[in-house]
Image (spheres, coloured by chain):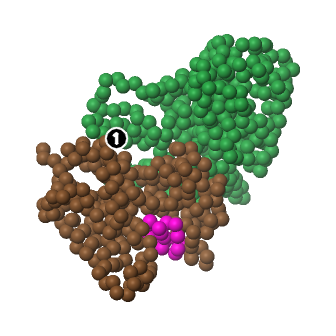
Amino acid sequence: MSKPKVGIFGLTSCAGDQLVILNCEDQLMELANAVDIRDWEMAKSQNDEECPLDIALVEGSVAQVRDIETVKKIRERSKILVALGTCAVWGGIPAMKNDVPREVMLEEVYGNDVRFIESKAAQPLSSFVKVDFNLPGCPIEKEEFLQMMASFLHGDIPEILNFSVCSECKMKENVCQIVYKNQVCCGPLTRAGCGARCPSHNVPCTGCHGPIEEVHYDSHIKMFQLKGIKPEEIVHKMQVYAAPAWMPEKLMEEMQHEGE
Amino acid sequence: MFQISRQKLMDGFKRFNSAYPFYITTAQDENYQFQYIPINSWEETFFAISPIRTAQPLKSFFYQPVQKVAEYPKTNGTEDDFQPLAIIGPKACDLQALKIIDKVYAEGEYPDTNYVRARKNHIIISTDCLNAGKYCFCTLMNYQPYPESDFDLNLSQIDDRFLIEVGSEKGQEILDTFFKGTRKAPDSLVKAREKLRKKVTEQVKKQNENFHYYQSHQNAIERHLDSEIWADLGKTCVECGICTQICPTCHCFLLYDLPREDRYERIRVWDSCFFAGYSRMAGGLTPRLKLADRFKNRFYHKFDSYVTNFGVEACTGCGRCIEGCMGNIDLRVVLTELEKRVVLKENLDLI
């Protein structure tokens, strides 16, 4: 059996997820032996930019016009397309201020003269192409990434944790940030996988993995109100990583509904 | 029943700690936690009888949140690092809860080897509750705030003296081996313990006096299986799963296989019936699609199907689910509401 051909790509992003792959120091050689990495601009000098791929790992959000063509081309040449990291899955930090027009932002940052960036409101990959598997995280978890790759190599569907950070937090026997400290903690809205890293260090969850599959908007609103936390605060916090996920808008709608 | 002075007890713990690592209750923030004491590091300052139960349930010593249960292809008998522990300070509600989990993991046709090994080898030195915790309601569930059975040794403090009750052969062995200078307890001391126990029991009863259950919970739940009331009662539930993770009797798990380089590992992790994926089957079918259905299921399992299958309700009144709920959902209130409606319905029928 020939090794699966893999391509690793970055759209508009910080390259942090690709860095996580490079940081798998103990397993990197095994991984490189198990798959045939054909195209990885960040780590290889000789890349085949045309060959068909079995697995494409795509990091970053679509925040420039040219990214649309790039991601469509990747989709055409690959069998499995994985959205790697919160930017690719939910839009991530580049999408945080999507409500501000890009012209305003460009002028603010680069001044009047610069016109070389064709920037657009950042969107996740799924807005443009079919995504076969989502691996969120800012950055992705090393362990989750390796498990995903191992599953693909075994011909399995990777196991995705389908519950919120709260569950992992309780397994770590942490003191609840919401119940005991009235903190704006995104734990109950955020997909698990990190092992409740922040609450374990006494920091409320920032929601970097993006929302869980099934969010109960009305219940969340009621719950946060009970704790004296303004829903605006939690929406604001969730928008840092997952603004284009329709969730914050839905939460806002629900809030208005509550107010009536 | 034996009596021991504080100094002799401390000496005993020191000797005991040379053979077993300890977990002992300790105050942390507003709660009580188990603190780990490795072998040969006992100091007198560690010793404290916590007034109420710890924040986390006792079950995690016997049934860990994440545990490798098998691997294949089978490797040549790699033993895991199981270590018998002495757990000092659990309360009656937790001991009773273990008994409830035993029915699933230890007593059936296929006992769980890891669980049974832990049950056999860990040593439990329980203590009486010194007052009623804010959320405690053991008396409502017909339990007492002091252990009567299922411990190896039970420790009660009366002024500066300690009463030790032996609950098992293993407990007697430990008492004989490590604790020197025990004397048979005089009746006056036992009576003093009874008095203290009664006081705490009354405290728990008093703070729950607004809740009365006339009906069996089983009846109340069975008559509401198709009711809309669950969505109403669980309207602030956000599916975080905390109530099940910290419940001393909840024991559902998820098995999944982790691919490693040359083998698979089968991992068992705590699951919760609140999660959308909990009852999902192949093909994506979910019998409990709505959160309200899952909310109902927790009560159905605890107070109805568990009674049918094992003859006991899967709740000991530790109150952790009330304390930990972000949405302020109170198990007592839910049961009361259900019952209120049943009584109302019956009265209406009479008319």
Q: Is residue B297 above or below residue B95?
A: below
Q: Nearer the viewer, residue B172 or B23?
A: B23
Left or right of B153? Residue A7 is left
Q: Magenta: predominant secondary structure element? A: helix
Seen at 43% across and 42% down, the residue is: B254
Please state the horizontal and vertical placement of residue A151, each as a whole percent of the image: 28, 46
* Residue A50 within the segment the image draws in magenta: no
Callout count: 1
Q: Is residue B268 above or below residue B120?
A: below
Q: Residue furthest bottom?
A: A112
Q: Is residue B277 visible in this depiction of the protein? A: no
Residue under label 1, please give it: B257
Tint applied to chain A in the drawing: brown
State which region is magenta: A236-254
Q: Nearer the viewer, residue B242 or A119?
A: A119
Write down which chain is painted green.
B
Seen at 39% across and 84% down, the residue is: A111
Quarter occupied by residue A88 = bottom left
Mark 1 neighbour density, 10 Å: few (under 14) some (14–19) many (20 or more)? some
Please state the horizontal and vertical placement of residue A25, each as a whole percent of the image: 31, 45
* Residue A242 within the segment the image draws in magenta: yes
* Secondary-structure class at tag 1: strand
Please state the horizontal and vertical placement of residue A110, each as a whole percent of the image: 38, 81
Question: What amino acid type is highlighted by mark number 1?
Answer: Asp
Please state the horizontal and vertical placement of residue B28, each as a whole percent of the image: 67, 43
The chain carrying label 1 is B
Q: Nearer the viewer, residue B215 or B240?
A: B240
Seen at 34% across and 78% down, the residue is: A120
> Which quadrant is the N terminus of chain B positioned in?
top right
